[in-house]
């Protein structure tokens, strides 16, 4: 198909993406399907195997990349969160995964809960690290149950801290926990080394990674992982001040999380999937009060670190386009799922690179010809003048391979500027 | 005075709603009247949501207030009298999918709109839908699914309903995540909805709205 070396392809693709982000006109519209469990389905292995058979998963990712030749490849390590054996060892309670509470061919799914009670805001605000270690983590990792009985972390620096440590480590259940953690560590090392080689191989095949770092909107951290949807929605009425303080407290943590992993890997793109700020999920007033200010600070903080936020606006944000416009131009990617993408181009076209627009439902159920027509429309309107990356609206678990092929190949052909 | 409670709940004034409820019960008022008022309030909440004035957090908060009001009224009854229902609706998240936030909001809105809702929960096998339809003779079924992987599950559930000879006795609506007209066609559902109010209006349209007036 092409005589270019993988190095040349890698450079060319990186440049194309970079141009789109900087709102310049690239040589053509980049196309980057955000594959998730599609890798495993396409390669004929189960989602369960993706979590448990690291070599099969690697082969599936490489096969998909080689067959479709996208401009960016979705990070195979983020998609499945963590390997199955590790999740089992630590007894992770926040998700169910394929073969473990979920049929073997379905994606892992979160179980939302009130992992932090309403009356625990003060403890969290007072010392978040202590709260996370001694209260939150034992609730979501069964193996860390004994951590509940650790002494408060900050009394460890009172000179006689060692006495507390000695007492904490004397518990037989703590020994058991530490032994399991050692096993989990070995498993983790095995998985990470295979994932590291996989990433290296993908680069050698000529594919830049979409991102190697994740951060969340501070509101979502509280809503998804601490209070649950119902909890955080009630908090907006019943304890708005505490909620706002907690969101502010989380902001530097997320900034640190995003920056840390991006700097370590050298990949500047930080993936930020949004969950609870969509149209309908809160009023415009609530969005301006609880959601956007810290999200904006997160985006700007990352940009100031020289990083590129890639924000996935799950569901519909059409009514919020004017608000989310308020960031520096040419420094981020806004990926839209059900937002009116034509309107997004109108409102945001001079500020941010737009990604997405292809309905996942069409990729799953439509015919290649319909996909082609939709691509044409997206390229004509959203692609006009650059600043656009062709992609599905949401992560791709299922899709007809011929539809993906059409989306990629037709964009390469018709998307030339 | 009756309007005060209706407004307090509808305007999401929690403390006021609870004080008014206690006062009226202490004054010896028939608890049934209070139930009727809270139902009126929830109708207003539903209308405001439909009109774009209220959002999901407002629904959740109104539900929270309603629950507390109902808890105060409950001890005055031997059992909470059933208000007449608009009709029966079966709802569940289809097999393989455990997402429940959207489904719960739909269930809540259908209930406060006066439907008798059978909530089958999450990860519901097709056979459970079939059995529930046979048992209740419900004429509206709602399938919820967040994942794209759920489209096949929805299709299979509808196929199972058809194979049980029940498909022509009821209507099926679907919703959640990526669900749109493409998915409706693919699964063979009668309609799809993008939010909780479309579920309510579809159910009303399909069942008919004859019992809409309050039974006071």
Image: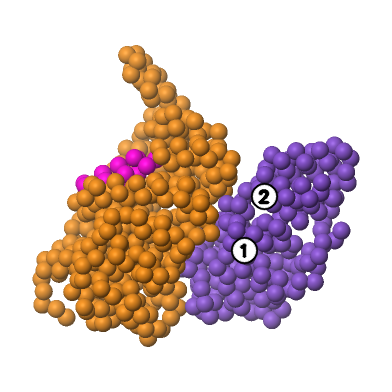
Chain colours: A orange, B purple
Residue B158 visible from this viewpoint: no
Q: Residue at x 57, y 52 (%)?
A: B57
Q: Which mark is residue B51?
A: 1
Query: Is A304 covered by the magenta stretch?
Result: no
**Which quadrant holds residue A235?**
top right
Quadrant in which the N terminus of chain A is drawn: bottom left
Which residue sits furthest top?
Answer: A160
Identify the magenta region: A250-264
Considering only vertical position in the picture, is A164 above or below A339? Answer: above
Q: Is residue A234 visible?
A: yes
Look at the numbered disc 1 and give the secondary structure of its residue: loop
x 51%, y 50%: residue: A286
Cα distance between the residues tagged 1 and 2: 15 Å
In this orientation, which residue lies closer to the viewer: A371 or A15?
A15
Q: Quadrant of the C terminus of chain A?
A: bottom left
Instruction: Choose the circle earlier in sequence order: 1 or 2.
Output: 2
Label at residue B11: 2
**Residue A382 point in image, percent of width and height:** 33, 73
> Dominant secondary structure of the magenta stretch?
helix
Point out residue B5 in the picture as x, y percentages from the top left corner.
76, 47
């Amino acid at each position: 198909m092409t005589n270019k070396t993988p190095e040349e392809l890698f450079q060319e693709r990186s440049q194309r993406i970079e141009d789109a982000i900087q709102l310049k006109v690239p040589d053509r519209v980049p196309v980057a399907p955000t594959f998730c469990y599609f890798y495993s389905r396409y390669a004929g292995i189960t989602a369960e195997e993706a979590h448990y058979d690291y070599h099969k998963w690697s082969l599936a990712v490489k096969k998909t990349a080689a067959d479709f030749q996208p401009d960016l490849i979705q990070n195979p390590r983020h998609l499945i969160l963590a390997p199955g054996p590790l999740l089992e060892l630590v007894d992770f309670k926040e998700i169910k995964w394929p073969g473990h509470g979920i049929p073997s061919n379905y994606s892992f799914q979160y179980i939302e809960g009130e992992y932090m009670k309403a009356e625990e805001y003060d403890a969290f605000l007072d010392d978040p690290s202590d709260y996370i270690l001694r209260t939150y983590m034992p609730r979501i990792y069964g193996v860390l149950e004994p951590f509940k009985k650790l002494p408060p972390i900050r009394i460890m620096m009172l000179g006689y801290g060692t006495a507390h440590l000695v007492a904490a480590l004397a518990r037989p259940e703590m020994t058991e926990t530490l032994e399991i953690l050692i096993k989990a560590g070995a498993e983790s090392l095995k998985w990470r080394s295979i994932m590291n080689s996989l990433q290296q191989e993908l680069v050698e095949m000529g594919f830049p990674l979409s991102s190697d770092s994740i951060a969340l909107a501070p509101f979502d951290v509280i809503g998804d992982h601490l209070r649950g949807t119902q909890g955080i929605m009630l908090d907006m009425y019943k304890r708005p001040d505490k909620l706002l303080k907690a969101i502010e407290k989380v902001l530097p943590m997320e900034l640190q999380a995003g920056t840390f992993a991006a700097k370590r890997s050298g990949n500047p793109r930080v993936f930020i999937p949004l969950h609870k700020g969509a149209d309908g999920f809160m009023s415009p007033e609530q969005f301006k009060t609880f959601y956007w200010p810290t999200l904006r600070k997160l985006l700007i903080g990352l940009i100031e670190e020289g990083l590129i936020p890639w924000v996935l606006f799950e569901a519909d944000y059409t009514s919020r386009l004017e608000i989310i416009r308020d960031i520096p131009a040419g420094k981020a990617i806004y990926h839209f799922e059900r937002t009116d993408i034509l309107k997004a181009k109108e409102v945001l076209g001079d500020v941010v690179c737009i990604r997405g627009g292809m309905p996942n439902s069409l990729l799953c159920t439509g015919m290649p010809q319909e996909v082609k027509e939709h691509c044409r429309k997206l390229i004509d309107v959203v692609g006009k003048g650059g600043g656009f990356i062709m992609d599905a609206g949401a992560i791709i678990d299922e899709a007809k391979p011929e539809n993906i092929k059409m989306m990629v190949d037709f964009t390469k052909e018709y998307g030339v500027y | 005075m009756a309007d005060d409670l209706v407004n307090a709940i509808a305007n999401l004034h929690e403390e006021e709603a609870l004080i008014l409820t206690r006062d009226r019960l202490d004054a010896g008022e028939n608890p049934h009247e209070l139930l009727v008022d809270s139902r009126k309030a929830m109708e207003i909440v539903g209308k405001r949501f439909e009109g774009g004035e209220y959002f999901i957090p407002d629904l959740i908060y109104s539900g929270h207030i309603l629950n507390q009001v109902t808890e105060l009224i409950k001890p005055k009854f031997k059992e909470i009298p059933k208000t007449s229902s608009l009709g029966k609706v079966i709802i569940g998240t289809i097999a393989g999918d455990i997402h429940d936030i959207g489904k719960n909001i739909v269930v809540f809105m259908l209930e406060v709109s006066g439907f008798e809702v059978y909530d089958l929960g999450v990860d519901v096998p097709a056979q459970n839908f079939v059995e529930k339809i046979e048992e209740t003779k419900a004429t509206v079924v709602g399938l919820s699914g967040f994942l794209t992987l759920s489209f096949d599950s929805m299709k299979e559930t509808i196929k199972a309903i058809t194979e049980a000879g029940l498909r022509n006795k009821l209507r099926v609506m679907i919703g959640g995540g990526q669900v749109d007209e493409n998915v409706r066609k693919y699964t063979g559902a009668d309609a799809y909805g993008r939010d909780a109010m479309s579920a309510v209006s579809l159910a009303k349209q399909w069942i008919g709205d004859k019992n809409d007036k309050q039974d006071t």
